[in-house]
Structure formats: structure tokens, C-alpha cells
Image (spheres, rainbow, N blue to C red):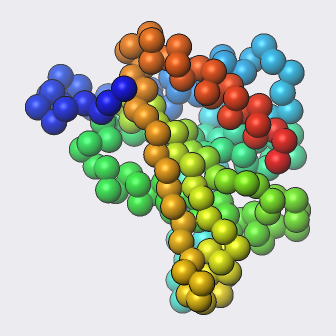
Amino acid sequence: WSPIRPEDEFLYPPTKDEQIVNTALLTFLDSLTLHFDLSVGWSIHRMAFKATFTNMEFQVRTDGYLADSNGDIKAIVEVKPLIRNNKETQIRIQESHQIVANLLADYTSPHVQRRNKPHRLIISQDRHEIYISVAEYDDNYIDYLQTGHTRNNPFLVMHQYGPWDTLNPDAMDDLGPIILALTAIAQTY
């Protein structure tokens, strides 16, 4: 599947309210996992995270998340009422900020096991297109976030997959098993 061509964007005006997209995505995610005995679940609750550094801090809010019964966030949900092409740079920056704030929350948590996640995951829906983004990082990046040290080339890399068009049944047939697999895997870390 591919993003909307710029010349076709006029066919897809922004939705009236971001909450419409949020409810649609979380209902879809929940319906995929509802009939399985999983130790994690999707929530429409908006979670706030604060990232604090030596000279500054910022706060982010998610549009929902996947968490276990102890409140450990396994995946972040982020939605926009418009197609990604319109504000791709800003959307990617926001999603990266959410990952950073979630990482710092886990690494400052008294629950040490929260630090052992193999990756960070964001499920996004921008209007009618769903994306999956996986954040890749290493201990050097965590050290950079906590101390500001830039030795050993610390980077966070966001791998984006999609879009899957919610108006296309074949795309949704392809996406369903992927989301179910990611959800099942998330309960193991």
C-alpha cells in the first residue's frame, strides 16, 4: 500500500474531530485482540509522559496505548485527523518525542523490568491510514538521554511501516494479523 498522492489529497479532507479517528483505531485494535486470552489490552485513555533533561523538559500525551494490568505501556497510539503527507515532519517529531518520554519514564521507574523492552512501538492512524513505527535504540542512546554524553554515536531510529488504508478491505486483512502478532509479542516483555 502507498500513501495518498499529493494530487489526490483534496479527496480526503481532515475529519471534523481527532477523537473520531482515535475511537475508530482503538475499536479496531481492541476488536482484533478481544477474543484472545492476552495479558495486555488497548486503552483509549490519554497518557501523559514528561521527559526531563539537565536544562529542559517537555511533556507529551498519547491518544491511547497498549498496557498490561500493572500499567506497563507496551505500545503507544497516536492519531491525527488529516493525512500524514500534510504534516509528516511534525508528526514524526511528535512520535519521536513520545518514544523518548516513554523511554525515560521506564528508565526512571522503580520497576526495573520495564527497561528490558526489545523495542518501542507506535500504532498511528492519520485520517484513514494506519502506520506502525518501531523505535530502535541501544544502551548508548539511553546513556545519552540520561547524561547528554554523545560518545559511541547514540541514535534513535524510527522505522515506519504502512500506510494501510482503512477503506481497503485487503489492506485491513493484511494488517489484522500483524497487529495481533505485535500485541501477543508485547505481553512477553
x and y percentages locating residue 80 in the rendered image: 39, 39
Residue at figure coordinates x 71%, y 65% from the top left? 105
Q: Position of residue 79 (x, y in %)?
A: 46, 39
Residue found at x 79% / y 63%: 115
Task: Work out whether residue 52 can be spotted.
Answer: no
Farthest front residue? 152
Q: Is residue 89 left or right of residue 162?
A: left
Quadrant of the rendered structure where residue 40 is? top right
Give coordinates of residue 76: x percent, y percent: 61, 45
The correct choice, above or below, for 99 with respect to 183 in the image is below
Q: Residue at x 81, y 67 (%)?
A: 109
**In front of the other: 82 or 123:** 123
In depth, the one of 60 and 101 nearer the eye is: 101
The quarter of the rendered structure image containing the N terminus is top left
Q: In the shown orientation, is residue 41 left or right of residue 151? A: right
Query: Looking at the picture, does residue 121 appear above or below residue 154?
Result: above
Task: Return the x and y of residue 134 as percentages of the image width and height.
Answer: 57, 49
Q: Is residue 140 above or below residue 85?
A: below
In front here: 129 or 20? 129
Identify which residue is drawn at 41% across, 60% down. 93
The furthest residue to the top: 169
Residue 88 as seen in the image, left or right of residue 132? left
Q: Residue furthest left?
A: 7
The answer to whether residue 106 shows anywhere in this view is yes
Quadrant in the rendering for residue 106:
bottom right
**Tally of numbered discs:** 0
Q: Is residue 25 above or below residue 46?
A: above
